[in-house]
Amino acid sequence: MPDPLPGGDGTAAAPFATAPGFAELGSRFFTRLAPTPLPSPYLVSVSAPAAALLGWDAHAATQAGFIETFAGNQVPAWADPLASVYSGHQFGVWAGQLGDGRAIRLAEARTAGGPMEIQLKGAGMTPYSRMADGRAVLRSSIREYLCSEAMAALGIPTTRAMCIVGSDAPIRRETVETAAVVARLAPSFIRFGHFEHFAAREDIGALRQLADFVIDRFMPACREDAQPYQALLREVSLRTAELMAQWQAVGFCHGVMNTDNMSILGLTIDYGPFGFLDAFDANHICNHTDSQGRYAYSQQPQVAFWNLHCLAQALMPLWREGEGEAGKDAAVEAARAALDPFRARYAAAFFRRYRDKLGLRPPAGRDEDDEPLLTSLFQLLHEQRVDYTLFWRNLARISSADGSRDAPVRDLFPDRAAWDAWAGTYRARLRAEQSDDAARAAAMLAVNPKYVLRNHLAETAIRRAREKDFGEVDRLLAVLSRPFDEQPGAEAYAALPPDWAAGLEVSCSS
Ligand code: AMP
Ligand code: MG
């Protein structure tokens, strides 16, 4: 345990040592500035598991100065606050310079698990705020907080959220809401857009510095490669492929997969208009603002691949040697070679995850031999608009011998005969591999969550929080932190969405 760092006047003392981290890169990469204070801040919620990543226990929030520190009202002695600059493609179009318009990094903590950046989201204007106010509202902050922690509990790579601090300061969106700040944690918040930024400026020195920073700190194996920067691109492609398979398997829709919202570490980042599938719809669009469905559920893996092409384009100057078309062709070829493993890795991860969800052993032949079973299932779920989470959970308990225990899953299908037909194929496969029902059920229940952050659950917690009752945020956080466990008394959190949920719309407004 490193020596604790003192706070300053009215700030939180910290149980960790710090390092310069991103600040090492120098002033081309960021602007140093303090958060803008918020009037009369109050604690909304603390995630004990996230706080523990920094060495704080569950009572940390009662420490003097904790709320002031995470409201951004006091800058502790251990902090070196800064906002970073990046650019990006938004909805397929080059958007130019963006940057941390409302996020301020406080510090990089040195933890047992490696470096951990502490960032305040909603901490006030920065040089990158453009026309916006630098703030985040309580509604979107609760959504980001709950989903970050829920994803972590699901085993899906993600930035974390340690606490929410609220204030009654009015924030204008479609209506007037109130302000909040989320303390986010991640080993790094570097995005594809950071690389695009320096490539667009043709600042190859900065580009190389950034790539070296990521390689040396997070992907040291790339350094051993004859072409470290191509190895970096390959590694990011593989991580992103794994992440996409996890999103698809759990039914998570990100909603705004712009290149500035893609983590170089393969983390889920920037929770805005995200959603989990309720009734399965392959073309589900969770972001009301995304009228074209660019980021629909079924599009996510290929959008990620498109985003990786943007990253490749940005990194290419690092291995382009020689002038003219010949140099360019060779560089493009090398980029293609580094991106290409995305497909195979995504396919392998996809089949592995869905086989696990189905409780199947790998086929005797190739992964693709499972394709007909899966394709027919997706088609069926789509046509019948079956609740995605309940389907998998209830599927775990059927019998491989006959339909005697089918009711909980069969009743999810408006057309029971359609289920019976698919179930026949599935049962045949289970019998062919002599599946043991009890062992299979246990394995399936360990990968198919019972509890996910359905929109209406978040909405209920938000409505109560607006009335200053934060208990539902905490309850939901607790339920979502054990998504695979049966939790007596929490059945309502696993139920089908109520009728009023159909009217919920989630947009980019945050
Ligand atoms: P997003 O797509 O929500 O991740 O944000 C895109 C860009 O807009 C990023 O550069 C954000 O920092 C910036 N941004 C979003 N909302 C605000 C806000 N309220 N104030 C300042 N910048 C913002
Ligand atoms: Mg963003």
Image (cartoon, rainbow, N blue to C red):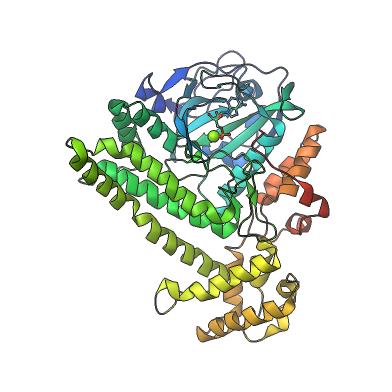
- The percent position of residue 105, horizontal first and vertical second, equals 50, 26
At horizontal 64% and vertical 16% (from top left) the residue drawn is 37
At horizontal 56% and vertical 85% (from top left) the residue drawn is 428
Query: Residue 429 or 448: which is nearer the viewer?
Result: 429
| In the displayed structure image, the side of residue 429 where residue 334 appears, left or right | left
Q: Is residue 443 visible?
A: no
- The percent position of residue 166, horizontal first and vertical second, equals 71, 27
At horizontal 51% and vertical 26% (from top left) the residue drawn is 100
Q: Residue furthest front?
A: 325
Quadrant location of the N terminus in the rendered image:
top left
The number of numbered badges drawn on the structure is: 0
- The percent position of residue 233, horizontal first and vertical second, equals 33, 45
Q: Is 494 above or below relative to 441?
A: above
Q: Is 218 above or below relative to 19?
A: below
Quarter of the figure with residue 135:
top right
Quadrant location of the C terminus in the rendered image:
top right
Query: Residue 250 or 330: which is nearer the viewer?
Result: 330
Query: Residue 121 or 417: which is nearer the viewer?
Result: 417
- The percent position of residue 36, horizontal first and vertical second, equals 61, 16
Q: Residue furthest top?
A: 9
Quarter of the figure with residue 328:
top left
